[in-house]
Amino acid sequence: MSNDILPYVRNGSWSAQHPFYCQCAYFNLKKYEEHYSTLTKLEETLKTELKHIADPERDDLIYVKTYQIRQMCHESAVSMHLFLCMTIEAFVNHYGVRRLGEAFYKQNLERVGITEKIALIIATCFQKTIPKDNLIILKSRALFDKRNQFVHPKSKEINQNNLMNLANLHPKDFPVYRFLNDFEEIIEEFYKLDPTILKEIEFKKTFKNLDE
């Protein structure tokens, strides 16, 4: 079987979406950081302007007056997360097609779940079986479980007992950097397995200006 495993770097052309998705993820990270900076400055200003009002009324007013920018933080954080998962899935599909051939990959792996797909590709291409507690598997599962919460939202009835639990997190509590770090560790682990991956080209963190 090993004779049928093709090198990642070889003659040929393939479509690849993961470089674009990766740049979109970091673009949305930048947007999140800009919105969060605006939010914190606005909150400090409002705390000063509304200092004559006692809590919790003051906190309620600040929440209302910062609602829009909080929503913008949330939008950017969710968008970043979705693009991180799209990057991983697109890369794994791309890698599998280049190493195993498109026909074999589509027939046997394309419809498999993301963590199972990663495990099978590593087993096939590197003759390594990885356990369920492997770093790549654990971090990929965490990223995609959170992604599933975003794309398959469930509605819940609100009452006095769960009101605070269902309230939107403050942007400072979004696990943005934890999931970003997970993503970068996943890519790094793939690179350790196959140093022929053009990491600096395929996973750029910024868009190139058109005039460069």
Image (tube, rainbow, N blue to C red):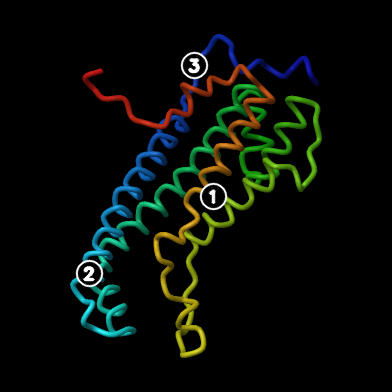
Q: Residues within 10 Å of mark 2 (few under 14, many from 20)?
A: some
Which SS class for mark 1?
A: helix
**Which residue in the protein does label 1 denote?**
178
Task: Kindly state the secondary structure of the residue where label 2 is placed.
Answer: helix
First in residue order: circle 3 vs circle 1? 3
**Kind of element beneath mark 3:** loop
Residue 73 image offset from top left, x and y in percent: 34, 57
Query: Which residue is nearer to you in this view: 190 or 121?
Result: 190
Label whose residue precedes the other's in the sequence (3 or 2): 3
**Residue identified by numbered label 2:** 46
Above or below: residue 4 compared with residue 56: above
Q: Residue 72, labelled with which disc?
A: none
Quadrant (top left/top right/bottom left/bottom right) for the N terminus = top right
- Residue at image location 44% in from the left, 44% down from the top: 83
- Evaluate if marks 2 and 1 touch, with contact meaning CB atoms under 8 Å apart: no
Observer-side mark, 3 or 2, equals: 2
Instruction: Identify which amino acid the numbered label 2 is placed on.
Output: Leu
Q: Residue at x 67, y 28 (%)?
A: 104
Give the Cα distance between marks 3 and 2. Answer: 56 Å
User: What residue lies at 57% left-to-right and 51% top-to-bottom?
Assistant: 144
Look at discs 3 and 1 and give the one toward the viewer.
1
Quarter of image, res 49 = bottom left
Q: Which residue is mark 3?
A: 13
Mark 3 crowdedness (10 Å alpha carbons): few <14, some 14-19, many ≥20: few
User: Furthest-bottom residue in view?
Assistant: 160
Three-letter amino acid code of the residue under disc 1: Arg
Q: Nearer the viewer, residue 30 or 127?
A: 30
- Quadrant in the picture for residue 17: top left
168 w.r.t. 17: above or below: below
